[in-house]
Amino acid sequence: MSYLLVVAEKPSVAQSLAAVIGAKTKKNGYLEGNGYRVSWCIGHLAGLADAESYDPKYAKWNYDDLPILPESWQFVVGKDKKQQFEILRSLMNDPDVTAVVNACDAGREGEAIFRTVYNLAGCKKPMKRLWISSMEDEAIRAGFRDLRPGSEYDGLHQAALCRSQADWLVGINATRLFSVLYHRTLNVGRVMSPTLALIVQREAEIDAFRTEPFYTVMLDLSDFTAAGERLTDKAEAQRQQEACADSTAVVQKVERKEKSEKPPALYDLTTLQREANRLLGYTAQQTLDYLQNLYEKKLCTYPRTDSRYLTSDMAEGLPVLVNATAKAMPIVKGIAVRCDVSRVIDDKRVTDHHALIPTQNIRTTDLNRLPVGERAILELVALRLLCAVGQTYEYAETTVTLECAGHPFTAKGRAILNPGWKELDSRYKASLKNKPETDQETEAKALPVVSEGQSFEVIVPGIKEGKTTPPKRYTEDSLLAAMETAGAKDMPEDAERKGLGTPATRAGILEKLVSAGFVERKKSKKTVQLMPTHAAVSLITVLPEQLQSPLLTAEWEYKLKEIERGDLEPDAFMKGICVMLKELVSGYQAIKGAEVLFPSDREAIGKCPRCGDNVTEGKQGFFCANRECRFALWKNSKFFSAKKKQLTKSVASELLSTGRARLTGCYSEKTGKTYDATVVLDDTGDKYVGFKLEFDAAGPKRR
């Protein structure tokens, strides 16, 4: 019997696919039935090999070995994943299998995961592609009815391959270069470093900011309050206050404008991560994890999308989905739900996947049985769908300009004409335990009816004191927004992808910065701020502009899109990366005095006899903290090993302190006996430090 082999990215996805297409018989590492065999990859089964796989000498980090530029790339299977790889290799090469279906996630990384295994397994079978944006049963059936030739995604695979190889090259070479030059591990990455630079730059702006007070005279006019101009001189504010006391404020002008706010667009991954961080306090990674679980439970569409619109073929079924979503959300009770489909349909603004929306399964799911995080994210996605197809929010804004004692004052008010989509949005936000800060403009109350020339008696004018505030530290919400737009103004107008990273990778980048010790999460009031560590500031200080600018990664993403479309040859892209790294290694000079930036966290055992800096212990010996000094006491020194003695920490400390140290039980190669003597530090400034022996007047004490 012949079979179609379906390869999913994860076991849970494979089980969902198998249930729909009828592969219900469990086998060792796969499911079988109805002409299908369904297996899985467990994420990245294989990846690019480490540097030492190309040459054992790369196990040690040496400046002279840089740049490391493999001529042909090697892949290795993870140690804990070899069993599943062997199952896949056997299945792919089984004569009963006529073709292989790539059912990994429909994106760049999913393509890379499948193709790496397919190529490592030596598979030559015809390749097909399952491309779906939902795990709903009907979406899966439709996807299998419309399997596409795998060759249509060759460009996507080439882009994925170039991305991973280029990141490997930059990560390996830049990390080793700066770590060797500055004598500590400094992780450098194509997206990590410019993202870190954003955080460090913001901290520098905060440190440089000088707070200044300001003063505003306030008039209490019975039913409303009017504010004067902001003043920096307190004495001037007091003079205005005195002048306005017991005076009359006269209305000079009344302006009324009717305004509106259209419903927001649907969520893509990044906007959902930002909103979940701001409203719920979730990290970007938490939101992605919850969303992935909802996708696999068939409650949400594909998570890693960068689109905020739906395609025209979805328009017909959208009212039914909106109705089902409204019924599933208790918060909607009592609010009339509208459905203007035209607001969310735009074929031109949909890339690989459409916007995030709940699936029809929301109508039959008890949301209270979901884990708290998953339920909260599903509610956000559902709420956004209902808001996006809702009515426009309409209001009238009134601005009243008054004059009192020769000084201008202003009062603003807002009257809601149609609450539209904001009625539901406001009700949701009011239900949250940690309610977000309200926008003063939005919350402005309606003013009483006033007319030009009307006068008001000033009751008691007051002075409102305030201070200018520095830029706010990044939260994950604001950092994701900055990553999304970084370098955009310097990119071509038609660039499909701008900013730092992609929606699928930004959460991982933030987690790497935290785990590498470059960024700390610190809670301040209701928000969690991202703060750079000392190591982060030091790293950004020494990194060349090229590696901390968002332009490099933005340019990469633009070129990777060109590779996907077949407009750029992968070899041309990779040659450019190699040229850049050769120039970096040959042209970069370490900053003098960088010891201040990277102080050793090791205990000082003494002072260097050459430069006076601290000497600390390392694995191989005792070294001067000043990298330009090169003073070193090596533990494997032939002088000590010949005498069967070890240069210990205490001996090294004594040598640095007094220039000499007493040794007992030294071995004599001539006599085979042991003796006691004093070793004297004999440093002439050469590459290797010398030693001498001194004996008592009676000669060496023999044993």
Image (spheres, grey):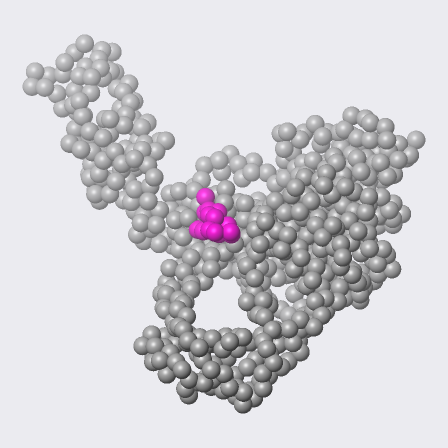
Say which quarter of the image contains residue 458: bottom left
Q: Please give left or right for residue 371 compared with residue 284 in the image.
A: right
The N terminus lies in quadrant: top right
Q: Is residue 276 above or below residue 601?
A: below
Where residue 664 sits: x, y (%)? 20, 17
Residue found 54% across the figure and 39% down from its top:
51
Give the residue at x 41% y 60%.
206
State which quadrant residue 636 falls in: top left
Residue at the limit of the structure toward the right, as seen here: 1
- Is residue 520 inside the magenta stretch? yes
Above-or-below relation of 524 to 409: above
Q: Which residues are magenta?
A: 517-532
Quadrant where the C terminus sits is top left
- From the viewer's side, name the closer residue of 384 and 54: 384
* Residue 435 coordinates in the image, percent (x, y): 58, 54
Q: Give the image location of residue 225, x and y in percent.
A: 50, 75
Vertically, is 614 above or below 500?
Answer: above
Q: Quadrant of residue 436?
A: bottom right
Q: Residue furthest top?
A: 703
Magenta highlight on residue 84: no
Which residue corresponds to the image point at 89% horizontal and 47% vertical from the top-left?
145
Most distant residue in the bottom direction: 453
Look at the image and tell me whether residue 571 can be seen.
no
Q: Nearer the viewer, residue 545 or 603?
A: 603
Q: Is residue 200 above or below residue 216?
A: above
Q: Nearer the viewer, residue 393 or 533?
A: 393
